[in-house]
């Protein structure tokens, strides 16, 4: 579970689990259980900007928002702009950890590769050999079939 602190000094836990995946699907129509969901894969949409992340995050954090008597607007207003990149990175890492712990290693690797690619792309020349290598890795991993929790080696036998 990842944590972040808002502009008012409140600590928030970003926990992606079965309950939060269900809430996000019910309220946003976004299936966090399938990072390839959509014509443009979900993981690409989340990593490419902040709009979808800021739509999904309050739903993931809803139990904490509710306990604190806040609403979505006040929650989002308290997120500092300068912390958005780290928040997105933490969200993606938490999402990757969910897949890792549920036996969906390919999905976890795909999210990790996408994060590494985004990091490299912002810090290096987009035409550098390192970025090209990460692009190739990301393409390979994203084309691999995703395992279901019921067919993973840990769940059989």
Image (cartoon, rainbow, N blue to C red):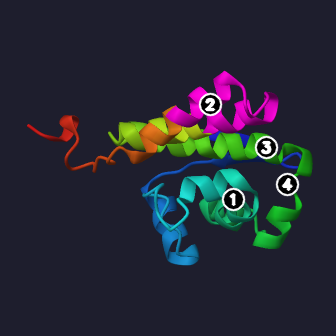
Residue 121 among those drawn in magenta: yes
Badge 2: how crowded within 10 Å, few (<14), some, or many (20+)? some
Q: CA distance from mark 2 to mark 1?
A: 26 Å
Quick one: SS at disc 1? helix
Which quadrant would residue 119 be assigned to in this image?
Answer: top right
Which of discs 2 and 3 lies nearer the camera? The answer is 2
Residue for badge 3: 85
Residue for badge 4: 79
Above or below for 151 versus 100: below
Q: Could you tell me what secondary structure mostly forms the magenta stretch?
A: helix
Quick one: SS at disc 2? helix
Q: Disc 3 or 1, which lies upstream in sequence?
A: 1
Q: Position of residue 100 (x, y in %)?
A: 41, 37
Q: Position of residue 47 (x, y in %)?
A: 67, 50
Q: Is any atom of residue 119 visible in this view?
A: yes
Residue 59 among those drawn in magenta: no
Q: Which mark is residue 132?
A: 2
What residue do we see at 46% from left, 66% from top? 22
Q: CA distance from mark 3 to mark 1?
A: 11 Å
Above or below for 28 versus 100: below
Q: Disc 4 or 3, which lies upstream in sequence?
A: 4
Q: Which mark is residue 155?
A: none
Q: Is residue 115 left or right of residue 26?
A: right
Q: Quadrant of the C terminus?
A: top left
Which of discs 2 and 1 lies nearer the camera? The answer is 2
Q: Disc 2 or 4, which lies upstream in sequence?
A: 4
Badge 4: how crowded within 10 Å, few (<14), some, or many (20+)? some
Span highlighted in magenta in the image: 115-136
Badge 3: how crowded within 10 Å, few (<14), some, or many (20+)? few
Q: Disc 4 or 1, which lies upstream in sequence?
A: 1
Q: Is any atom of residue 71 visible in this view?
A: no
């Amino acid at each position: 579970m990842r944590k972040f602190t808002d502009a008012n000094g409140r600590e928030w836990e970003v926990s992606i689990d079965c309950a939060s995946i269900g809430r996000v699907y019910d309220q946003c129509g976004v299936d966090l259980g399938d990072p390839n969901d959509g014509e443009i894969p979900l993981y690409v949409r989340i990593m490419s900007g902040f709009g979808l992340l800021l739509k999904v995050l309050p739903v993931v954090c809803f139990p904490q928002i509710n306990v604190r008597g806040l609403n979505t607007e006040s929650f989002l207003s308290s997120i500092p702009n300068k912390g958005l990149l780290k928040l997105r990175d933490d969200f993606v890492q938490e999402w990757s950890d969910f897949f890792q712990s549920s036996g969906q290693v390919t999905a976890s690797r795909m999210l990790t590769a996408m994060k590494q690619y985004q990091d490299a792309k912002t810090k290096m020349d987009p035409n550098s050999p390192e970025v090209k290598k990460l692009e190739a890795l990301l393409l390979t991993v994203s084309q691999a079939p995703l395992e279901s929790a019921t067919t993973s080696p840990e769940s059989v036998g």
